[in-house]
Image (spheres, rainbow, N blue to C red):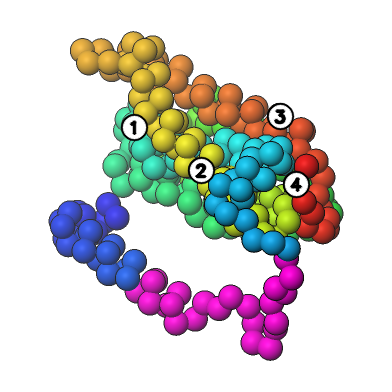
Amino acid sequence: MLALITALGGKPTMLINGVLGIGIFVLALAFLKDFPEGYEAETDTGPSLSLLEGLKVAARNKQNWLAGLYIGLLNLSVLVLGAVWGTTYLRFVNPDLSEATFTGIVGMIFIGTMIGSPACGWISDRLKTRKWSMFGGAVLSLGVMLAIMFPPSTGAGLFYVLFLLLGVLTAAQTIGYPVIAESNEDRVLGTANGLAAVVLMGMGAIGQPLFGQLVAWFGGGPGATPDQIQAAFRSAIWVMPIAFIGAIVCALLVDETFKRESKPAN
């Protein structure tokens, strides 16, 4: 995006982005199917529920809340560092790096997520556990986040590796979705996943402005010196390890669901 904006300008870049989105929509419309050819979907799933009834059933299941919170807390690093504050934070860590380097480092979170999402699911299947795979992903994410906060050096190469690892490990959030699938009956599965998505997006809606408020609260508001702003960012970034600790707690509290058949909510 930065390279396109530099070469073409903001408006052409957004037009390219929009055309790309339309292309993805057309491909999805042409090739996505509800189920493979020759497969007959089961229709005997019990009486249908209204939206409100489905929400009540989904909300009564603690697994949905724990998995949703786990997904949201691990994803907070992507929503806060990847989407908004990452380049600003890196600019204070090492101001000698170029803007292209800052955006390249932050982009490694998303590359790591692409790698980590299928890898974490595969590991969960191989270990035959959802609970402890979620726990391990959160613990390792916490370790990488602390390394980002207290790096042994401020070279670009190290941060490329650390942000890549952060994306790979926080992709353990994807294990929360099979937990939801294995903890709900089919007729409320979509509603339960929707509830988890509300929690996930709620984390971003709260986390992004909260980080800015924390920076201001710790002395990085208007009129602050560069040293004061840097100190404020180093204090505000503690919201990330706190979120990962919360994810660890959720993983410990969630019930194991590996290979469990869908069941009515408790």
Screen quadrant of the N terminus: bottom left
Q: Quadrant of residue 47?
A: bottom right
Name the disc covering residue 265, or none.
4
**Residue occupying the point 44% across, 82% down:** 30
Question: What residue is disc 2 on?
Answer: 198
Q: Callout 4 environment at 10 Å: few (<14), some (14 to 19), or many (20+)?
A: some
In this rendering, is residue 127 above or below 248? below
Q: In front: mark 1 or mark 2?
A: 2
What amino acid type is highlighted by mark number 1?
Answer: Thr
In this rendering, is residue 35 above or below 165? below
What amino acid type is highlighted by mark number 2?
Answer: Val
Q: Earlier in the sequence, mark 2 or mark 4?
A: 2
Name the disc covering residue 249, or none.
3
Marks 2/3: CA–CA distance: 20 Å
Marks 3/1: CA–CA distance: 30 Å
Q: Earlier in the sequence, mark 2 or mark 3?
A: 2
Q: Callout 2 environment at 10 Å: few (<14), some (14 to 19), or many (20+)?
A: some
Check whether the beta carbons of the residues at disc 3 and disc 1 lie within 8 A of each other. Answer: no
Residue 145: where, in percent of width, then height?
A: 57, 32
Check whether the beta carbons of the residues at disc 4 and disc 1 lie within 8 A of each other. Answer: no
